[in-house]
Image (spheres, helix red, strand yellow):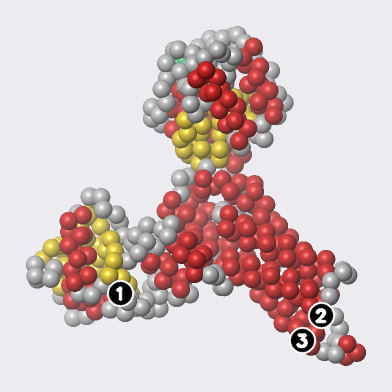
Amino acid sequence: MDTIAAIATGYERSAIGIVRVSGERAIELAERVFKTKARALEPKKLYFGEFLNSDGDVIDRCLCTVSRAPASYTGEDTAEFQCHGSPVVLGEALRTLFKLGARQAEAGEFTKRAFLNGKMDLTSAEAVVDLIDAESISAAKEAAKQLGGAVFEKIDEIYTQIVNIISDFEVTIDFPDDETPEFVLEEKRETLEKAEKTLASLADSFENGGRYLKAGVPCALIGRPNVGKSSLLNALVGFDRAIVTPVAGTTRDTIEEVCALGGVALRLVDTAGLRDTEDEIEREGVRRSVRAAKEAELVIGVFDGSEAFSPDDESVLSALADAKRAVALVNKCDKKRVLELKAPEKVPVFEVSAKTGEGLGALSEFIGAEFAARDKSAVTITSARQFEAVNAARGALAAAMEGLRGGLTPDAVLTELEDAAASLAKLTGRRVTDDVVHDIFSRFCVGK
Ligand SMILES: Nc1nc2c(ncn2[C@@H]2O[C@H](COP(=O)(O)OP(=O)(O)OP(=O)(O)O)[C@@H](O)[C@H]2O)c(=O)[nH]1
Ligand SMILES: [Mg+2]
């Protein structure tokens, strides 16, 4: 492979900046640009020395380490320079390497090479970008698990089982009718059933939380005007995102912001206060609030604890009753409590104050308990791509088992098993098209 180079740490001024090089000439280039007391750069050692540009000028005093194929991230020879984090220095170092024949790495090209060289499967490669993009500690933990091969191991075990069954089955089919050995697939039914169950639980893990791990759980803050929805949004995200005023009807359009609560990423949507109004703009706002509540996985109903229950609070209660999951916040608990609230059963109620932050800790714990993975060792599917592949494999396995019970010819059962194996191979990247690979790695940053 040709030799690629990139700044791995971005173009911001920082304490340390890393330049990576990978490919056939990586170590040779490192030896040419890096002057150190050692006679040669040995793998996995950290050397202190000088980085020289093409005019022979010292542009940095930095550290360098090299790795030899295949014992490196990419599976190729690599060199890494830990420079001072000046964009000027890093840019000059990169230009020096380009002059010597390296070329700029594309987004994700280091990890793509790792995948193509068999250093990691496709689910682990996807986890790299998920880890970098993680907006909550739950998302990071799941990505780290997947990076360590958790999804791959589960899927690949099933893949191998199916492939073995296919080859046994092919032997059986090749026999003439009167000499067919014992029906092998019948014996394997248990294996297939177990595999189907595992795939079903992986698909469930996506439906029950995994799908929101990266994007955040969609949450709508709803309530009548002035109860403090925007103040709560600001308190939860930690900065003045939404306009707050004592005027009822301040928020008109929905406002969305991601925040991490209880280790879970929430996609919080602040909405216009629910009330009957003649104002055309506000009416559209209210329509959008209702829609946000319908689309939310969690509806957060907000009430003003310092005021008596009002007819406008009624529509909030019914939205909570209709929601998939809901919680009621009695806000302004820094003031004297006047409100009497009869929240629907199963809707937990928290007394909070957007002003002082009281009660937000309890809300955070509730969110953590509700949405973070309960079984820490369980594997969660977090991408739609993986979910589709798991479901396709599961469908094909179910059809194959159905076929075994009667119905299908052995050839048809075999086709279903092959389809299941193909879907799993697509998932882990054992058999995958260039388009899918391109699509996955284009989400990466340059230098990773
Ligand atoms: N004392 C006290 N005042 C609060 C609290 N939360 C909000 N407020 C005040 O209540 C008023 C309304 O707050 P907002 O956050 O704009 O209320 P809202 O629900 O977004 O209102 P609309 O956008 O009009 O629907 C402001 O004057 C806030 O300062 C709280 O916890 N305690
Ligand atoms: Mg508001």
Q: Is 68 situated left or right of 285 in this image?
A: left
Between marks 3 and 1, how big is the CA–CA gap?
47 Å
Residue 382 to residue 69: above or below: above
Please tell me which residue lies in front, 254 or 398.
Answer: 254
User: Is residue 44 visible from the viewing direction of this image?
Assistant: no
Q: Which mark is residue 184?
A: 2
Res. 48 image quadrant: bottom left
Q: Earlier in the sequence, mark 3 or mark 1?
A: 1
Q: CA distance from mark 2 to mark 1?
A: 50 Å
Relative horizontal placement of residue 47, taking residue 149 as reference (left or right): left
Which label sits in the foreground, 2 or 3? 3
Q: Residues within 10 Å of mark 3 (few under 14, many from 20)?
A: few
Q: Would you call the spot at circle 1 few (<14 residues within 10 Å), some (14-19), or many (20 or more)?
A: many
Residue at figure coordinates x 68%, y 64% from the top left? 393
- Residue at coordinates 42% horizontally, 26% vertically from top-left? 242
Number of numbered discs overlaid on the protein picture: 3
Q: Is residue 413 visible?
A: yes
- Could you say which disc has been placed on residue 297 in the image? none
- Where is residue 370 drawn, in percent x and y? 61, 39
| Label placed on residue 3 | 1
What amino acid type is highlighted by mark number 2? Val
Question: Which tag, 2 or 1, sits closer to the chain's start?
Answer: 1
Residue at the spot of label 3: 171
Q: Amino acid at mark 3?
A: Val
The residue located at (46%, 49%) in the rendering is 134
Question: Badge 2: few (under 14), some or many (20 or more) residues near its Cα, within 10 Å?
Answer: some
